[in-house]
Image: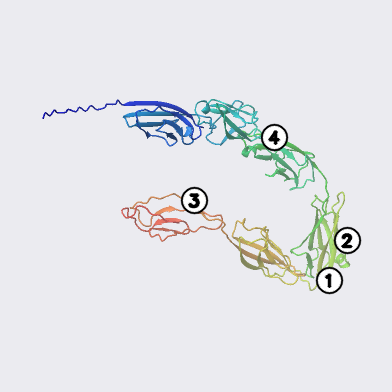
């Protein structure tokens, strides 16, 4: 048996590595399911699989079809999509899908609102930089081709090239006419059709001092009776500018500064009686701008003779504060019992204004006489009072002002004569009271009740705007807010007038303590943020002097916590070291004052 060996020769199949590239394009507004393209597949049973893909793209390995799975947005991608296919043979297929841009984005400014300002004196052609817009699209779709101001705006225009964009002034600005412009700036891209983006610019016109004060008088020709402290007229000042540029200060011209005054409200009052008719008064108004502007107005003041008031008969009784006279048998002949004068708020009276007795009882004519000396009428005792006399005399005086439209007035005087009426001073004891009241007491609050008696009356001898007394009941009450008082202890003197024939009044002194009410918390002055203490500092060393202020009352200092290292003087705020400090034990600590 012959055996022949069989030699099998294995020859491997050698396939060459291949790499293919395909490019496609799809519009970013393509709907899901739309076909993008197809690649040719090999016919020798080679299988394809996606090695690197995209969730928005579907590849069919059986047909080579490429289609869109979902909406795509070029602006939220790199502008293209890549696929990598591998086969069962050593080969690669690269697929590049470009996303075609559509004009689906409007230009966008960095902010929808922009605040800017220009001074009203800015010359025509002045420019103001504003932010420019950007467009997320590509090519012409993403190119800003024009900026506009929407609506009509003759005062401004847009100039410049992005990224430098300007608002330019084309006509003069006047803040007093218009102080704010709202400009709707639009950016237009180069797409077809084009798209717009908007930004509102709020342009404030800043003030410059370009307006003089305007002064107006309530009356340009005024009649004045020459009296002091009379309101003449009021000047109204205005200025179209803002702030200090529009704040107007008024003053009287140099010629009449000593005769008239003008306050911050523009009210002109007379401070001195002068003889000028007319008085041509110049009022100057100057603003606080830099440089300042001024203007003036002139008013004519004419003297006018007025007789608006009755004359007044003044009776000053010798050595007393009562409104009656007591003439006893001990009063010597020639003694001046009373001094009478006549005055008139409308002006000076000629002499004594015809002062005379209207109806005098026989007893008055027997014992008294009127002695005229210049502007004074002296009521004198011309005969010693008889011992048997004890009478009460009522005498009436009359006087007139002697002016055009003459006015006449009368006044009565009671005189007690004879025995039983002691004209010498019988001193009534003075008395004193003390009381206290809180500074926040409302108007009308009762302070104290003065001791009264039948027929007595009261008046306040101390001028005070804060307190008043009931003339009959003696109730002392608050008449004005006490917060503006400068003192916490006040002395008030009251006069208690006894019924006739008592002559001397009783003086009552009231010492009033006003209790302070703190309306605000104290505030520290020049308080440092921290202090440094050397460990060599000895106990008792002053570390600092605290200062605090309070609008009412004193300030008391104290340490809130139980601080063992420091102590503070409650009255003067002096802080001292209480015990030595070791740097190795403590580096810092806090204390609350």
Q: Is residue 278 left or right of residue 468?
A: right
Label 1: state its secondary structure.
strand
Labels 1 and 3 touching (C-beta < 8 A):
no
Between the residue at mark 3 and the residue at mark 4, the CA separation in whole angstroms equals 44 Å
Between the residue at mark 1 and the residue at mark 3, the CA separation in whole angstroms equals 74 Å
Between the residue at mark 4 and the residue at mark 1, the CA separation in whole angstroms equals 72 Å
Between the residue at mark 4 and the residue at mark 2, the CA separation in whole angstroms equals 60 Å
Q: Residues within 10 Å of mark 1 (few under 14, many from 20)?
A: some
Label 2: state its secondary structure.
strand
Residue of label 1:
391
Q: Residues within 10 Å of mark 3 (few under 14, many from 20)?
A: few
Picture disc at residue 301: none
Residue 93, given in percent of the width and then of the height, sits at 37, 28
Residue of label 3:
525
First along the sequence among labels 3 and 4: 4
First along the sequence among labels 4 and 1: 4
């Amino acid at each position: 048996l012959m055996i022949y060996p069989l030699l099998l020769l294995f020859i491997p199949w050698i396939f060459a590595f291949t790499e293919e590239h395909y490019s496609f394009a799809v519009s970013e507004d393509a709907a899901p399911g739309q076909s993008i393209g197809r690649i040719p597949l090999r016919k020798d049973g080679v299988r394809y699989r996606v090695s690197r893909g995209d969730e928005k793209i579907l590849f069919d390995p059986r047909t080579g079809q490429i289609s869109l799975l979902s909406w795509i947005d070029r602006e939220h991608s790199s502008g293209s999509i890549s696929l990598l296919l591998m086969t069962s043979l050593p080969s690669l297929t690269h697929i590049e899908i470009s996303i075609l841009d559509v004009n689906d984005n409007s230009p966008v400014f960095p902010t929808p609102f922009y605040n800017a300002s220009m001074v009203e004196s800015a010359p025509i052609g002045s420019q103001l930089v504003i932010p420019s817009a950007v467009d997320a699209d590509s090519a012409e779709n993403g190119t800003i081709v024009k900026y506009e101001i929407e609506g009509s705006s003759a005062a401004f225009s847009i100039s410049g090239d992005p990224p430098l964009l300007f608002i330019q002034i084309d006509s003069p600005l006047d803040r007093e006419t218009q102080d704010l412009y709202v400009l709707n700036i639009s950016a237009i891209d180069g797409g077809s059709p084009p798209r717009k983006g908007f930004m509102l610019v709020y342009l404030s016109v800043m003030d410059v001092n370009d307006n003089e004060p305007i002064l107006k008088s309530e009356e340009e020709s005024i009649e004045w009776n020459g009296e002091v402290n009379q309101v003449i007229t009021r000047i109204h000042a205005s200025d179209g500018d803002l702030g200090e540029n529009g704040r107007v200060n008024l003053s009287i011209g140099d010629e009449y500064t000593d005769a008239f005054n003008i306050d911050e409200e523009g009210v002109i009052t007379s401070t001195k009686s002068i003889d000028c008719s007319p008085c041509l008064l110049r009022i100057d108004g100057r603003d606080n701008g830099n440089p300042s502007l001024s203007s003036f107005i002139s008013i004519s003041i004419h003297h006018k003779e007025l007789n608006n008031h009755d004359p007044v008969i003044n009776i000053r009784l010798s050595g007393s504060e009562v409104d009656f006279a007591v003439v006893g048998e001990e009063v010597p002949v020639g003694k001046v019992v009373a001094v009478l004068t006549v005055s008139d708020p409308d002006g000076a009276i000629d002499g004594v204004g015809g002062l005379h007795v209207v109806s005098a009882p026989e007893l008055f004519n027997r014992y008294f006489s009127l002695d005229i000396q210049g502007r004074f009428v002296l009521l004198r005792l011309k005969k010693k009072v008889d011992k048997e006399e004890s009478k009460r005399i009522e005498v009436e005086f009359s006087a007139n002002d002697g002016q055009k439209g003459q006015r006449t007035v009368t006044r009565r005087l009671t005189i007690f004569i004879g025995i039983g009426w002691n004209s010498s001073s019988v001193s009534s004891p003075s008395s004193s009271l003390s009381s206290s009241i809180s500074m926040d007491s409302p108007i009308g609050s009762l302070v104290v009740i003065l001791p009264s008696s039948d027929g007595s009356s009261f008046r306040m001898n101390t001028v005070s705007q804060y307190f008043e007394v009931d003339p009959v009941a003696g109730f002392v009450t608050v008449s004005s807010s006490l917060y503006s008082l400068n003192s916490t202890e006040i002395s008030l003197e009251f006069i208690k007038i006894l019924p006739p024939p008592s002559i001397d009044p009783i003086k009552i002194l009231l010492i009033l303590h006003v209790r302070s009410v703190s309306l605000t918390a104290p505030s520290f002055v020049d308080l440092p943020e921290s202090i440094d203490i050397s460990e060599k500092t000895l106990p008792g060393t002053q570390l600092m002097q605290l200062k605090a202020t309070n609008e009412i009352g004193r300030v008391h200092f104290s340490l809130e916590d139980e601080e063992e290292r420091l102590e503070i003087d409650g009255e003067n705020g002096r802080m001292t070291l209480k015990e030595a400090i070791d740097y190795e034990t403590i580096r810092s600590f806090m204390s609350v004052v």
